[in-house]
Image (tube, rainbow, N blue to C red):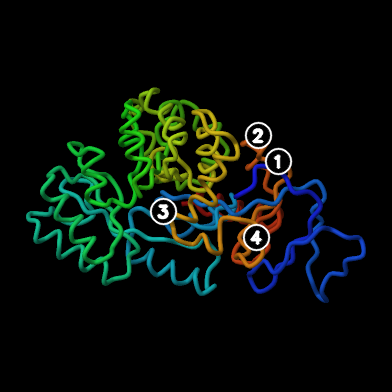
């Protein structure tokens, strides 16, 4: 999004998955032959949302993203199955958000998707393989050794392979910048208080994806989960796992309010939810994330930018996504209420247009019934 106000009474023409034109409404306008005409009176059109930090339980999670107007997502624990799903969606064999898939997680502890990494040489070989296999970036977590981290970063730079994830706890802003990490996840580095440190981080090319929802909603969700509607879309086995989760996972409130200061310094912030971690439901959690962005200091417009134009820039698709603009891809949401007035209005979805395909409210309801019935039967 690039406008902090509503442009009223415009016609948007879409053809072959692209926005062909946007022009002032005129009663004399004649729609093209065989066009599907959507009555947008008292509706609000925004770009499709982007979740920059997600995890999939299985391929049916794609429907939950679609239901909630998410047209792109960055999968942060990639698999070869996810690479295949990415291709199927890209070539319109399946409906779903366009995927950007990280490598399987590389680490030195139980977070790693690989067998225990015993040497730097092991790391470098894995990185080369992940790049060759077509993953979009290298995800690290649980790398404790600074020497390993530096070697991994150097290899990624050589391969022009984006390094994302969790930097070592012992690292600092200078090391993150030196190693050219592409994005830092969660509230890492949100504990910084000095303005010069914030300025330094904000002036770097590092994207920050705070995943506020994963920190703020987990502690109380366990008590209320049976009354929260979106949990009917969660696989039964996953709910059983979540029910064992200890309620000790809560963020320092000072770290949360650092969000506003970093934004004011010009930091590159994007919305991500860490969905599929305990109590964070794919798709639905993007609305919670945007609400949290506003709660901790961003305006409604700024929050929307984190999930549209900013997110598109991070994924390097901002030349054709992230805005309602002629020539851009037709990835859009029609809302019943204005999200610039109240961010929770992103939930008032009337229709979703994903890769040029129109899914009206009745279609979205059917999708929801399909997922809920399938997962509650298992």
Q: Earlier in the sequence, mark 3 or mark 1?
A: 3
Q: Secondary structure under badge 3?
A: loop
Q: Nearer the viewer, mark 3 or mark 2?
A: 2
- The foreground one among 141 and 269 is 269
Q: Position of residue 254 (x, y in %)?
A: 38, 23
Cα distance in 3D space between marks 1 and 4: 18 Å
Q: Which residue is mark 2?
A: 342
Q: Position of residue 239 (x, y in %)?
A: 42, 41
Q: Which residue is mark 4?
A: 325
Q: Position of residue 196 (x, y in %)?
A: 32, 31
Q: Secondary structure under badge 1?
A: loop
Instruction: Name the residue: 48% across, 43% down.
Output: 281
Q: Earlier in the sequence, mark 3 or mark 2?
A: 3
Residue 104 is left or right of residue 366, and the answer is left
Badge 2 density bin: few <14, some 14–19, many ≥20, Cα 10 Å: some
Contact, mark 1 vs mark 2 (Cβ under 8 Å): yes
Instruction: Name the residue: 55% across, 53% down.
Output: 70
Q: Earlier in the sequence, mark 2 or mark 4?
A: 4
Q: Disc number at residue 56? A: 3
Q: Which residue is mark 1?
A: 338
Cα distance in 3D space between marks 4 and 3: 30 Å
């Amino acid at each position: 999004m690039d406008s902090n106000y509503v442009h009223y009474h415009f016609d948007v023409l879409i053809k072959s998955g692209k926005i062909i034109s946007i022009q002032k409404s005129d009663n004399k306008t004649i729609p093209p032959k065989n066009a599907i005409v959507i009555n947008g009176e008292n509706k609000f059109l925004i770009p499709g949302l982007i979740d920059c930090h997600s995890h999939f339980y299985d391929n049916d999670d794609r429907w939950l993203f679609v239901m909630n107007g998410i047209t792109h997502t960055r999968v942060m624990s990639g698999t070869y199955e996810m690479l295949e799903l990415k291709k199927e969606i890209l070539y319109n064999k399946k409906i779903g958000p366009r995927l950007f898939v990280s490598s399987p997680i590389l680490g030195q502890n139980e977070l790693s998707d690989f067998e225990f990494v015993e040497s730097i040489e092991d790391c470098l070989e894995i990185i080369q393989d992940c790049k060759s296999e077509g993953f979009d970036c290298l995800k690290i977590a649980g790398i404790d050794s600074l020497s390993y981290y530096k070697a991994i970063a150097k290899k990624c730079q050589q391969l022009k392979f984006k390094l994302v994830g969790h930097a070592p706890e012992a690292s600092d802003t200078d090391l993150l910048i030196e190693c050219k990490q592409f994005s830092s996840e969660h509230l890492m580095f949100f504990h910084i208080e000095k303005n010069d440190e914030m300025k330094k981080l904000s002036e770097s090319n590092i994207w920050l994806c705070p995943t506020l929802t994963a920190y703020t909603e987990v502690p109380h969700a366990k008590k209320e989960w049976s009354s929260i509607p979106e949990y009917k879309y969660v696989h039964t086995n996953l709910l059983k796992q979540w029910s064992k989760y200890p309620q000790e996972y809560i963020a320092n409130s000072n770290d949360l309010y650092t969000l506003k200061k970093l934004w004011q310094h010009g930091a590159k912030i994007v919305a991500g939810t860490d969905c599929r971690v305990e109590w964070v439901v794919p798709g639905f959690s993007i609305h919670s994330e945007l609400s949290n962005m506003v709660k901790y200091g961003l305006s409604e417009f700024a929050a929307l930018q984190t999930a549209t134009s900013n997110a598109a820039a991070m994924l390097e698709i901002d030349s054709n996504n992230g805005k309602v603009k002629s020539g851009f891809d037709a990835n859009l949401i029609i809302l019943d209420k204005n999200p610039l007035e109240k961010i929770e209005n992103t939930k008032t979805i009337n229709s979703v247009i994903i890769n040029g395909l129109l899914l009206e409210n009745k279609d979205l309801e059917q999708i929801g019934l399909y997922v809920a019935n399938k997962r509650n039967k298992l």
